[in-house]
């Protein structure tokens, strides 16, 4: 994915948004630039980190987009712009990343209330309901993000869907290994009306079952149609014995930051309403080097 943008960024409400400082020819004062999908992920992540303040307990998400946020937090700590940050990682992978960057870490036992969590998502519907867990960390992500006062979701625009399951890609369910095939069949039968099929997630390298950080398996469900009432669907899944957690994150996100072709869109929950701010790519005065 490559998108051409003008070499600039100014927000409609005059807020400052940090964007990549891209290497361009000095002969052209305002040349076009190309942003990859990973650049868009980085833009969304850096915008979210603007909400991190010194002294916060911060939930550190997992995945390619959240990785940029963790990198940015560490960078600001090295610069002295953020101090006394405590991170709560949502996976072993994020734990290792944060340790390598020198971010002090703790857990929910010591810090049961998290000030702010930042994480990506695999799908986001218009009501800010999410699908997460295609990277396998859904259980720990949901534990940390449900304990957060604010949960900022960061995505590129490819993750937006009309309804949960609308991408036709996996909606993961973490299950205990015992009789996993029985669990798979019962899950699929719950959503036969939505054209559901399922499969056990396997490691590409070994062909064996993929194992989560918690020692469990993941069943990936795929939907041809809208499954309908999401809260009802959640209850039906969690009532099945052997089910640990599912990848639908319902009502947890407080803000969504989307980096896309037209710029950045920020959606924030205010009561039962969504406040929407838009930022166009027209000024790169405050940037970071890709």
Image (cartoon, grey):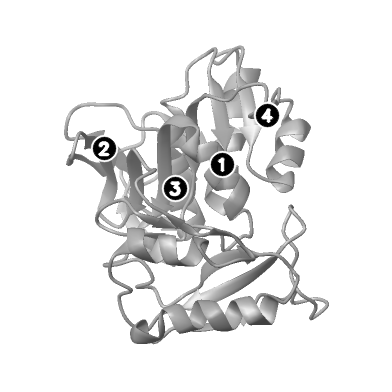
| Nearest the eye: 30 or 162 | 162
In the rendered structure, which disc, 1 or 4, sits on the residue that comes first in sequence? 4
Element on which disc 4 rests? loop
Answer above or below: position of 127 versus 71: below
Where residue 99 appears, as percent x and y from the top left, is 76, 32
Which of the numbered marks, if any, corresponds to residue 143?
A: 1
Q: Which residue is mark 3?
A: 25
Answer above or below: position of 132 versus 21: below
Q: CA distance from mark 3 to mark 1?
A: 47 Å
Q: Which residue is mark 4?
A: 107
In the rendered structure, which disc, 2 or 1, sits on the residue that comes first in sequence? 1
Element on which disc 2 rests? strand
| Nearest the eye: 206 or 149 | 149
Q: Which residue is mark 2?
A: 268
Looking at this rendering, what residue extends furthest in the right direction?
Answer: 206
Which of the numbered marks, if any, corresponds to residue 194?
A: none
């Amino acid at each position: 994915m490559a998108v051409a943008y003008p070499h600039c960024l100014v927000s409609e409400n005059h807020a400052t948004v940090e964007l990549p400082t891209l290497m361009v020819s000095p002969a052209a004062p305002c040349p076009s630039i190309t942003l990859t999908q990973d650049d868009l992920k980085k833009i969304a992540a850096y915008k979210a980190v603007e909400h991190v303040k010194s002294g916060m307990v911060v939930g550190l998400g997992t995945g390619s987009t959240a990785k940029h946020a963790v990198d940015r937090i560490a960078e600001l700590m090295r610069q002295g712009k953020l101090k006394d940050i405590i991170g709560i990682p949502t996976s072993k992978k994020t734990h290792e990343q944060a340790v390598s960057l020198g971010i002090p870490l703790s857990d929910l036992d010591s810090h049961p209330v998290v000030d702010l969590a930042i994480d990506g998502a695999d799908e986001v519907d218009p009501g800010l309901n999410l699908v997460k867990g295609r990277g396998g960390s859904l259980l720990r992500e949901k534990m940390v993000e449900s304990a957060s006062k604010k949960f900022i979701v960061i995505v590129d625009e490819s993750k937006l869907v009309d309804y949960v399951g609308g991408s036709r890609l996996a909606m993961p369910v973490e299950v205990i290994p015992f009789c996993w095939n029985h669990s798979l069949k019962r899950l699929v039968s719950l959503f036969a009306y939505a054209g559901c099929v399922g499969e056990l997630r396997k490691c590409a390298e070994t062909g064996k079952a993929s194992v989560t950080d918690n020692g469990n398996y993941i069943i990936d469900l795929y939907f041809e149609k809208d499954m309908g009432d999401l809260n009802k669907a959640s209850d039906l899944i969690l009532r099945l014995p052997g089910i640990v957690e599912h990848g639908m994150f319902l009502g947890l996100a407080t803000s969504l930051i989307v980096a896309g072709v037209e710029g950045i869109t920020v959606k924030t929950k205010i009561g039962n309403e969504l406040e929407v701010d838009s930022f166009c790519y027209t000024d790169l005065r405050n940037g970071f080097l890709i």
